[in-house]
Image: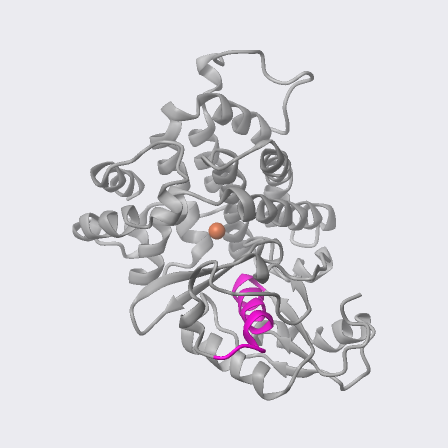
Amino acid sequence: MASSGARRPLLVSDRAVARLGVAESVVEAAGLPQGSASVFDDVEPELPLSCVRAALEAARAGAHDLIIGLGGGSTLDAAKVCAALAGRPGDVRDYIGVGLVPGTGLPSILIPTTAGSGSEATPNALIMDDERGEKVAMVSPHLIPTYAVLDPGLTVTLPPAITAQSGMDVLAHAVESYTSRRADMYTEMYSRHAALLAGRSLRGAVRQGNDLDARAGMLLGSFLAGAAIGQAGTSATHALAYPLGARYHVPHGLAIALLLPSVMAANLPAVEVKYAEVALMLEGGLPEGGLPEGRPHPDRLTAPAAVRRLCDEIGIPMGLARHGVDPAVIPEMAAEAHAIRRLMDNNPRELSVDQVAAVFADAM
Ligand SMILES: [Fe+2]
């Protein structure tokens, strides 16, 4: 275990987790001496840059030898940055971008308390640069934690709305990695299983929060989808979600849910077969022997509608306008999203700025 021999662990967490009072039991479960862990529990949702800097300062100041992340996606992302950069000089901004972390950092254990980001399996940390008003990403294989611990019991107290939004993020990770231009047989295996688990478990996890089987399905789905996006990436839905987060502070999972059906409808001509499979997975799985060769029957091309129906069933208030988005801003948001080539280049269909604007309009 990564904790063996650790003397000065830092637990990175947030106020919501602190209220649950599970931090001490996590330290104990990791086999660490009582009272040995320092705690930074100030991580904020959507992870502002100022917050990552504060966490990193705590990690550097304490000469820590192990980072434990306990919380939602933002908290785990902050913990990953701490582990990667505690022993390195410079500012967080110096490492923002792809492949700029030069080597392994401190050992880390990540323990998610939401099923959504899959951060415990990804090489990404997403940060809101509040000074520049943009959402940015630190991407490096050295951000992948040493260990991930999946305990569905930690997710049972999540309220239904958060469960629904973060669960749609899991489904979007599954769908976007599955249809990414960078997908391969290995990542497709993870994506398919994640989509299947989301299809089987999300409704139950929202309707009955203490349903441990449903919670376990979503937590495993989140991890598997995270592993898939670590290799294959996400695509247009995530690119379009960036300006919604930066301009309107729409939480990531909600932004993804609001956009996913419209992006899928736009992508449909490029990925008919894979979407037919997604539609079947959302209904509980592929038939014995898989889909027949060749083009699927048109009545199976229902994945965007199936996703929209799922959003309705789990109570997500659909429509960007209901969340304060001004349609007059669509051209600017479309240009911003289109420029995020790191994600848009993964999209199975080339979308022009006008087509991106049409997707935003469809999601209004
Ligand atoms: Fe996401």
Q: Quadrant of the image for the N terminus?
A: bottom right
Query: Magenta stretch?
Result: 72-89
Q: In this view, does 68 lie to the left or right of 262?
A: right
Where, by quadrant of the figure, is residue 262 drawn?
top left
Q: Is residue 180 left or right of residue 239?
A: right
Measuring from the top left, give residue 187's x and y in whole percent: 59, 38
In this view, the residue farthest toward the left is 328
> From this viewpoint, is residue 48 visible?
no
- Which residue is pictured at 73% across the width and 58% down the height? 151
Q: Is residue 108 left or right of residue 265?
A: right
Q: Is residue 84 magenta?
A: yes
Measuring from the top left, give residue 77's x and y in whole percent: 54, 65
- Which residue is pictured at 41% across the width and 43% down the height? 235
Where, by quadrant of the figure, is residue 142 drawn?
bottom right
82 and 294: which one is in front? 82
Vertical comparison of 252 with 285: above or below: below
260 and 118: which one is in front? 118
User: Magenta stretch: dominant SS?
Assistant: helix
Measuring from the top left, give residue 282's x and y in whole percent: 57, 32
